[in-house]
């Protein structure tokens, strides 16, 4: 081949080299085009993903919002299975919901009887608290919750008496008449025996049914028949809202320098009544010793017992509350120190009476005085409840009480499930224990006599 034939006119580049370069350029172009297409596709995917993800998150938020709204309007569901179907997928996997949904479905579709939805919901809620193992928790209907909250405030509607039953629960014995209640105004006395309520005998009604029949709405009337000194009387009383006497003071029948302050329960009105009782015992009756009778006291509000201990104790820790989340809160008495000492000096001796029914706030009261060596404890080992409950109102007016914290006394270990052992252990005699504490005379009361002896 002639060398010249390998060149084109006007171009000094060899023809084969030019073709190779064009081929390389084409490949580069294709590669760049493909790369751009890939990047474009990737960018489109990313943008699409972001948009879809955003929409997905919005959809999730919308679902959550709708679910929350459905829960807020839970009363609108007609059955458990209907509620179950509205739950998100993760909640449907919970065995409890599955089980309830199955049971509800079969009863709704195949049960030969009628379902009372109100009773069903009430008992399911009760069973939940029971199944949770919270022995001090409770679920309350709207009416029950009103009563619970009223009791916490120290208010009650009734005729203003404390009562006991006879051995066969055939009659109601009035053991104590509250000063400002309808019973006191009508002249009823301790020892009066109620035999009939609204014409029906207590023996036919049953003791507790008869008690409920005496209670009622404020301003309404109730007629009772009572016996005094062998004579029978009918009397009509108007039920009133009264402040329950949760503190009862009496001067000892024979030991004239001993005042006995019985604390029935701890509610919001108890601290004021307690301070008034102490004032009457020491300032008016010149008592040198006080016996705080907490036998049968089931406890009550933490705030009330803390206020009473703050009054009695010197500066320092009253109690430490430990919550379920691990946090703690200490309650301290006033920096000013012991109000009681400032008012009455340091020479007043104190004792606390306890039994197996002394529980909760009553145990904190007992243990705190024992820890600070302010009182000697006499009687029987206490119940052992060193935990507290939160009371939550529900949207439909019902209520829930459930255990949310433990509380420790000032210096001793927590007594939950253990109880508090008295300094002096003493049981009532068989004869005395057969009677209600209200009905025991001071000289029949072996535990009171042991406390008085210990204070000498």
Image (cartoon, grey):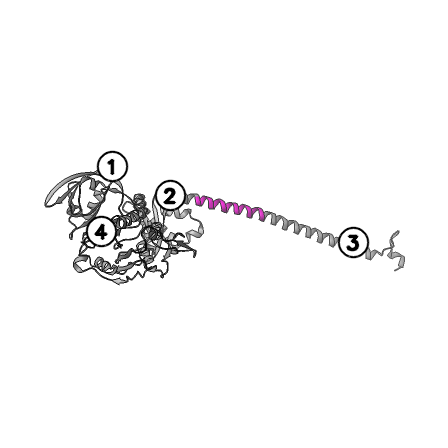
Indicate which disc, 3 or 4, sits on the residue closer to the N terminus: 3
Which residue is labeled 1 in the image?
219
User: Marks 1 and 3, how far apart in space?
Assistant: 109 Å
User: Marks 1 and 4, how far apart in space?
Assistant: 35 Å
Which residue is at the front of the view, 247 or 19?
Answer: 247
Which of labels 2 and 1 is toward the front? 1
Which of labels 2 and 4 is toward the front? 4
SS type, badge 4: strand
Q: Residues within 10 Å of mark 3 (few under 14, many from 20)?
A: few
Q: Is residue 126 above or below residue 219?
A: below
User: What secondary structure is the stretch in magenta mostly built from?
Assistant: helix
* Residues under numbered marks 2 and 3 in contact, where contact means CB atoms less than 8 Å apart: no
Which residue is labeled 2 in the image?
395
**What x and y, as percent, mark residue 325?**
43, 55
Q: Residues within 10 Å of mark 1 (few under 14, many from 20)?
A: few
Identity of the residue furthest to the left in this view: 230
* Residues under numbered marks 1 and 3 in contact, where contact means CB atoms less than 8 Å apart: no
Label disc, if present, on residue 257 of the rendered structure: none
Which residue is labeled 4 in the image?
251
Q: Is residue 81 left or right of residue 431?
A: right
Which residue is at the front of the view, 318 or 393?
Answer: 318
């Amino acid at each position: 081949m002639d060398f010249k034939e390998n060149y084109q006119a006007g171009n000094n580049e060899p023809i084969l080299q030019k073709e190779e370069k064009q081929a390389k350029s084409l490949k580069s172009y294709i590669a760049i085009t493909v790369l751009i297409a890939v990047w474009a596709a990737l960018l489109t995917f990313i943008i699409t993903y972001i948009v879809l993800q955003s929409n997905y998150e919005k959809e999730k938020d919308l679902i959550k919002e709708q679910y929350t709204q459905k829960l807020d309007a839970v009363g609108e569901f007609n059955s458990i299975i209907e509620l179950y179907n509205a739950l998100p997928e993760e909640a449907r996997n919970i065995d409890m919901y599955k089980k309830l949904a199955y049971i509800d479905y079969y009863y709704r579709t195949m049960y030969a009887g009628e379902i009372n939805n109100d009773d069903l919901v009430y008992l399911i809620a009760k069973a939940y608290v029971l199944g949770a193992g919270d022995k001090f928790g409770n679920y309350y209907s709207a009416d029950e919750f009103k009563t619970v909250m009223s009791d916490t405030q120290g208010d009650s509607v009734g005729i203003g008496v404390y009562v006991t039953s006879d051995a066969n629960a055939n009659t109601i014995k009035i053991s104590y008449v509250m000063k400002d209640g309808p019973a006191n105004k009508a002249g009823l006395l301790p020892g009066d025996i109620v035999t009939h309520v609204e014409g029906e005998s207590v023996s036919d009604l049953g003791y507790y049914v008869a008690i409920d029949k005496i209670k009622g709405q404020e301003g309404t009337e109730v007629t009772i028949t009572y016996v005094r000194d062998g004579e029978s009387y009918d009397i009509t009383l108007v039920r009133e809202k009264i402040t329950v006497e949760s503190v009862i003071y009496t001067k000892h029948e024979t030991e004239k320098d001993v005042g006995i302050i019985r604390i029935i329960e701890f509610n919001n009105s108890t601290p004021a009544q307690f301070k008034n009782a102490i004032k009457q015992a020491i300032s008016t009756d010149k008592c040198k010793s006080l016996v705080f009778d907490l036998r049968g006291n089931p406890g009550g509000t933490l705030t009330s017992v803390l206020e009473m201990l703050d009054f009695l104790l010197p500066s320092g820790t009253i109690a430490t509350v430990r919550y379920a989340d691990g946090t703690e809160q200490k309650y301290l008495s006033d920096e000013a120190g012991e109000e009681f000492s400032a008012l009455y000096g340091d020479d007043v001796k104190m004792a606390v009476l306890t039994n197996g029914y002394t529980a909760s706030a009553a145990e904190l009261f007992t243990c705190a005085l024992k820890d600070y060596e302010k009182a000697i404890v006499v009687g029987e080992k206490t119940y052992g409840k060193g935990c507290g409950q939160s009371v939550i109102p529900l949207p439909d007016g019902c209520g829930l009480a459930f255990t949310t914290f433990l509380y420790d006394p000032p210096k001793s270990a927590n007594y939950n499930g253990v109880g508090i052992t008295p300094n002096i252990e003493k049981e009532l005699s068989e004869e005395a224990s057969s009677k209600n504490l209200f009905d025991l005379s001071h000289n029949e009361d072996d535990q009171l006599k042991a406390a008085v002896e210990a204070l000498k």
